[in-house]
Every structure is written in C-alpha cells, then in structure tokens.
Amino acid sequence: MAQNSIRTHLIVVTHSGELDATQIPTEVASRVTHIIVDRASGDLTAVTETTLNLLSHGSQMRPGAVRTGSAGTGEAFGEPHGEPSSFSQRQNQRRLDVPVASGVPPLAEGRNSSSSASVTDNSDSDAKGDGGIAPIAERYRTRTPALRQMLERLEVAARHDVTILLIGETGAGKTHLARLIHESSPRRHEPLLTVACGAISGELIESELFGHVKGAFTSAHADKDGKFLAAGRGTILLDEIDVLTPEQQVKLLRVIEKGLFEPVGSNRTLQVQARIIAASNLELQPLVEQGRFRPDLYYRLNTLCFNIPPLRKRLPDIEPLARYFVHYHAQKHGIEVVEISDDFIDCLVGYPWPGNVREMENAIRSAVIYSNGGKLTVETLPPNIVSGAAGPANDPSVASFFGARKGTSLGNRIELTEKDIIEQALLNNSFSRTKTARQLGISRVTLYNKMKKYGMMPAN
C-alpha cells in the first residue's frame, strides 16, 4: 500500500500486538473517528462518534484515547479527526467493517497443529485488488480449484455495477459472499442491507422493500421508507427470492431493469440507486418450469449467476476451514486447544454437512467448548456428526453420501460377509458405533478395528 494513502495518526491494537498505522487506509480513516478492538476476538470495528458514546456508557471506553501498550484491552483507540456529525447522521449509528487485520489467523497447515498459535496478519501477502482489498478468492478461504475459478470470475463482476444472482444451499455462504462482493465494489463505503424474504410474510415483503405511506394498510400508522431507499447508493441483498409472488417478481424486475418503484399505497415513483444481489437456496430454472418463477425475471438474473457448491463437494476446504474455526472459537472463548486428533478431522471429512459451513462452525464451536484438556477428538463432536446422521438437505447427494442400502431378510443376511453385516448394522443404527457394537455383541474397539480393516472409515 502506498505511503501517501495512510493516516499516520491512527493507532490500533489487537491480540497480536500493536498494529502500526500503515494498516489503516486513508479511505477508511477519513470516514471514521474511532477504532474499537474486541476483547475476545481481536476484531477491529470502525464506529461513529454517536455509536462510541453509546458503547462507552458504563464501560471503560474513553473517546479519543491513544493506546500504545498491551493488546486486547477492549478500549477505543485513535485520535478524533474531522467533523463526525454528518457522517454519524448518514450512517445512523451503523457499524462498519474495517478491511484490515481482523485478529484471526490465516488457514492453519497440516494436522496436529496447535490452534493456540499466535495471531498473524497476512494482509501484506495477499494480492490486493482495487482499494487495497484482497481478492474475493483469497478472502473466501477455499482451496477447491473449481470454486476459486468461479470466485475469480465473480471478482470481475463485483467491480461493475451489475445485478448478481447467487445460488447455494442453506449455510453455503451466500450472505458472506455477498459481503465480499460489496467490499470489492466501488460501493464498499456505502451500506450493505440484507432482506431475508423467506422470513417476512408475503403481504409485508413489499412494504419492507419499497416502503409504504400512512394508511396504505391497517397497521400503516405512519410513512415508512423501504430497504431500497434506505440502502442509498449501497448494496441490497435479497435472500430467498424464490418465495416472492408473481406480482412481487414483476415489481422486482422493474426495479432491476429501470430502477423504479412506488411505495405501497403511493403513486409517487422513486428511483433506486442501490446495487442488487439476489440469492436463493433453490435452483430457479425448475421453478420456472413449474410456473412458480417468472421466466423474464429468471433470464434477467441468470445472466450473471454464480453457484456456490455445498461443503461436501469442497473436500479440500474441510480441514483448513475446521482449523480456522477451531482457532477462532478457542480464542473467542478463552480456551487453549493444544491438539486436534486425526479422527476428529476424519469425522469432519466423512460427514455430508447438509447445513454446510454454518453447520460445521456450530459443530466446532461445541467441540471447542467441550474439549477435555485442550484436545479435540471425535468424542468432543456432536453425536449426529459422529454417527453420520445428517439432517435434511435440498440435494439428493446427501441421501446417497454413505451409499445406504435397504435392509435384507434374515435368510439373506446369513449369506452376507462380515463386512456387509457390519455395514448393515451401521445403517440400522444411524452410524452410531456404540449402538452398532452393542447390536453385534462386540466391543466398540473391536468394531473400530474391523471398520478400519475393511476400509469403512471416513476417507481422508
């Protein structure tokens, strides 16, 4: 980063020690008055003067304090500069992510590495895109070649003012990817708003998106601006667009093509200035064929459509993602993890993850909390992960992940080999080794050894 793009009077501190001001870009420093360092995670957050005052109430935060001592105090650092009032009003106390060191380490390499290793900043090693932001493929944390290629194409689209469609299962990272797109775009200093269409009742979606005027419907007691207006020149993520009614789809198509809309109950036409990112956990083409999604909207969105593969199809990413989450949650909860066993990783790789990255993070958070003596083993994972009893997913590959077969009669069962008997028992007991061993009348250790002998353990 060029030296002339730095505000050298800003100093922040994280768990890794003092970060010098060369890590704070001018475009960030000129728009904020304070940097807050989270005590637990070391995350940096830029806040307005108004927000800082709210956070400081009853705490040890001191506006304008410059700290040059030890890390991780949870205080605010930096010198106030400029006039914060207009910025505070515009952002309405909105917290902004700072694109600098986050206090979370890069992906750990190899097995049995300690997740309590010191925090490092790899911001200088990443290839920077426009505005000093690392490419999306680097920030998305993937080693899957096909996904990296897709993210490189997405990087190009992100820099242009075009509508983007993201398709991916629940928990695959659509919201996270939308944020990376926003941060890579020329609009990155403007708001990013998310509308979860599936969480809003059908009759209220239009009000949420377009706003309404007083008296438009029974509970409309006052005028209200919708998200399209609130987003300003920023970005708006419309998640689960597949739930929109045909009438709502027509209005969305008009917004995308002409940038125009009317608040509910009003004939006043307003202009949309925000960029739109649409997302769905369902493929839209089958919905078009079923008459549930308008073809014209589909073809308009499908021009720049990016499919996020589920975690079970990103096997190279599972171990590094797991180590990342172990480190993050160990640091967040103040737990020292000294060892990650091979069977812990094997179990993660062998599970189909219908809930994708979100499910993995939740499982690892639980494992870290229940770790014994700082060691992560299979026993620290939730039972359903160990047994392989995956929940529902909208992809048939989950159901066939373990190559499940239907049961056989007692007569046919006699003819099965030992391997087949064990496999069938595992299926009957939802892959619980304890229950399977009990059913077969053998110890859990014996079952483990036989599974290992017949190559029935999860693949590396």
Image: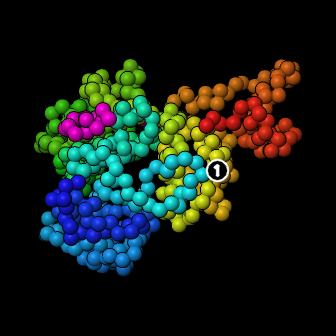
Quarter placement of the C terminus = top right
Residue at 22 percent across and 45 percent down: it is 130
Tag 1 residue: 341
Q: Is residue 160 magenta?
A: yes
Tell me where residue 414 sits by quadrant: top right
Q: In this view, does 398 lie to the left or right of 162?
A: right
Tell me if residue 434 comes above or below residue 48 in the rendering: above
Front residue of 56 and 195: 56
Choose top left, top right, bottom left or bottom right for residue 87.
bottom left
Q: Which residue is drawn at 51% across and 48% down?
A: 109
Whole-percent x and y of residue 161?
A: 19, 38
Q: Is residue 167 left or right of residue 431?
A: left
Q: Residue 184, image x and y in percent?
A: 26, 45
The image position of residue 386, as x and y in percent, is 66, 44
Q: Is residue 75 visible?
A: yes
State the image coordinates of residue 199 (x, y, percent, origin top left): 40, 45
Image quarter of residue 455: top right
The reply to whether residue 47 is visible in this rendering is no
- Is residue 409 within the magenta segment? no
Relative to 24, does residue 159 appear above or below in the rendering? above
* Front one among 454 and 224: 454
Tally of marks: 1
Asked whether 314 or 431 is in front, the reply is 314
Q: Please give the name of the residue rendered at 69% of the width and 36% of the height, measured from the top-left corner.
A: 457
Q: What residue type is labelled 1?
A: Ser
Instruction: Locate the N terminus by quadrant.
Output: bottom left
Identify the magenta region.
Answer: 152-169
Q: Which residue is drawn at 49% across and 35% down?
A: 314
